Amino acid sequence: MKKINIKNDEEDYYIGKIVCVGRNYTDHIIELGNEIPEKPLLFLKPSSAIIFSGQNIKYPSFSQEMHHEVELVLLIGEDLSNADENESGKAIAGYAVGLDMTLRDIQNELKKKGHPWTMAKCFDTSAILSDFVSSKDYKITLAEEISLSVNGKIRQKEKLSLMIYKPAQLVQYISTIMKLERGDLIFTGTPAGVGKVNKGDTLHAEIQGVAELFCNVE
Ligand code: ZN
């Protein structure tokens, strides 16, 4: 099992499941021609997909179009079922910036057929994490800016406040669908500006004042 260490938190967290939220920023929904969902759109990634800042993203042989999606990532600190919003907010133990790498060509085929997104979202190295900051040390305001650059050029840049469903709302909603356990991660969706990456690219993701990560595509 993969472990997360958080500065100023003596406890270890072993990563469990990864719950991802799709279509959580209006501009991104429009750029992909999707409809605004009535409830958060959820899918899962396996923990085997995780790498950390400084490691390389590997282009899968079965895709020609891997996209970057930069996202705020929440770490769940305690088990939670059918929680209210207050409990849900308190259950967030830490924050990181992450990349939800997506095989857009494969995803578009799957969407046409009405099939699940597993092949487009769960490949090795498709979930990249920065270090986490403890929610004891940092109170997120959502005024922070999230950004991603490829080879030094900004591709995605947005205020976290533009998320349709906010962190505690997402945790609350997910806890009514499935039990959340200590060590689970939630990828909270990406703003507009997603696009293709190529072998040899260097990616830099950041949430202002919270976390940053670097990785190369090979
Ligand atoms: Zn995503």
Image: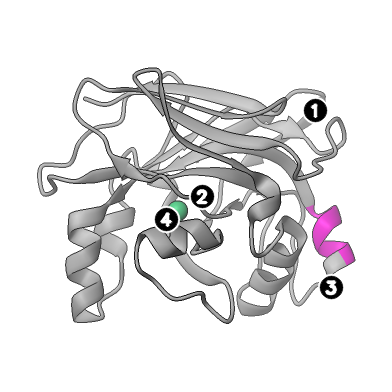
Q: Is residue 218 left or right of residue 36?
A: left
Of the numbered discs 1 and 2, the one sitting upstream in the chain is 1
**Residue 114 circle label:** none
User: For the residue labelled by badge 1, is the local secondary structure a helix, a strand or a loop?
Assistant: strand
Mark 1 vs mark 2: give the one in front: 2
Of the numbered discs 2 and 3, the one sitting upstream in the chain is 3
User: For the residue labelled by badge 2, is the local secondary structure a helix, a strand or a loop?
Assistant: loop
CB within 8 Å, label 3 to label 1: no
Where does label 3 land, which residue?
84
Mark 2 vs mark 4: give the one in front: 2
Cα distance between the residues tagged 4 and 3: 25 Å
Where does label 1 land, which residue?
10
Residue 181 horizontal/vertical position (percent)? 67, 59
Where does label 2 land, which residue?
191
Residue 178 horizontal/vertical position (percent)? 61, 74
Task: Please tell me whether residue 94 belongs to the stretch shown in magenta.
Answer: no
Cα distance between the residues tagged 2 and 4: 19 Å
Q: Amino acid at mark 2?
A: Pro
Q: Is residue 39 left or right of residue 175?
A: left
CB within 8 Å, label 1 to label 2: no
Cα distance between the residues tagged 3 and 1: 27 Å
Quadrant of the drawing holding the C terminus:
top left
**Within-10-Å neighbours for mark 1: few <14, some 14–19, many 20+:** few
Of the numbered discs 4 and 1, the one sitting upstream in the chain is 1
Q: Amino acid at mark 3?
A: Asp
